[in-house]
Amino acid sequence: MIHTIHFLCPVNASTVSILQAHCLQALVKGAESINLHISSSGGEVTSGFTAYNFIKTLPIPVNTFNISNIDSIANAIFLAGTQRFANSGSRFLLHPFQWNFGGMQSVDHERMREWVGSLDHDLARLVGIFDKETTNAEERGDWNALIRESTILDPERAIALGLIERVEEATIRDANSTWWITC
């Protein structure tokens, strides 16, 4: 039985926890595979990496579908898919990570180096995921450059770079086996 989970929200600790709970509930209910329909503007980097690593541990195939937008760290979640698809008209946004400062803060040199180091490390982790998950691509992507240049990819370009296997419209297989994560 195929279960469908809709992830239609920003990436944060709360939404990823709900995603994890729905995946585990689907397993308990006998899911043989999960179709994960994603439309997300991205969000918290750590939560995106957590979701990627969690999905990779599941003992069943998880197929990911870009149903509209996969932006920023949501790309990591999308790339966890066993097979990956995109609706026609969908897009992928790659851009550099940023650090949000809540108001005016005083920062010393060491803290600034730590933050720059963290951003560099997270970028390297994301590029590593892109490299690992797109090894069969017809065109090798320079993911560092694509991210640095704030690139938007349509489904056709995503096929060439190995992000998706093909354009395929997401469908709901069984309405009784459908889960929602919305904000």
Image (tube, helix red, strand yellow):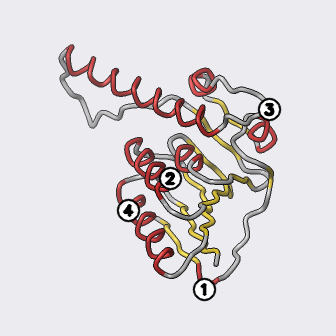
Q: In this figure, which residue is indicated by the disc labeled 3?
A: 138
> Is tag 1's residue or tag 2's residue first in the polypeptide sequence?
2
Horizontal relation, residue 103 to residue 64: left or right: left
Circle 1 Cα neighbour tier, 10 Å, few/some/many (<14 / 14–19 / ≥20):
few
In the picture shown, does residue 135 fall above or below 112? below
Q: Which mark is residue 17?
A: 4
Q: In this figure, which residue is indicated by the disc labeled 2?
A: 56
The image position of residue 175, as x and y in percent, is: 64, 83
Mark 1: which secondary structure?
helix
The quadrant the N terminus occupies is bottom right
Nearer-the-camera pick, 90 or 25: 25
> Is tag 1's residue or tag 4's residue first in the polypeptide sequence?
4
Q: Do the residues under discs 3 and 4 have CB atoms within 8 angstroms?
A: no
Q: Do the residues under discs 1 and 4 have CB atoms within 8 angstroms?
A: no
Circle 3 Cα neighbour tier, 10 Å, few/some/many (<14 / 14–19 / ≥20):
few
User: What amino acid is at disc 2?
Assistant: Lys
Q: Nearer the viewer, mark 3 or mark 1?
A: 3
User: What amino acid is at disc 4?
Assistant: Ser
Tell me the residue at 56%/49% (across/down). 80
Nearer-the-camera pick, 139 or 171: 139
User: What amino acid is at disc 1?
Assistant: Asn
Q: Tell me the CA gap for discs 3 and 1.
A: 38 Å
> Is tag 2's residue or tag 3's residue first in the polypeptide sequence?
2
User: What amino acid is at disc 3?
Assistant: Glu
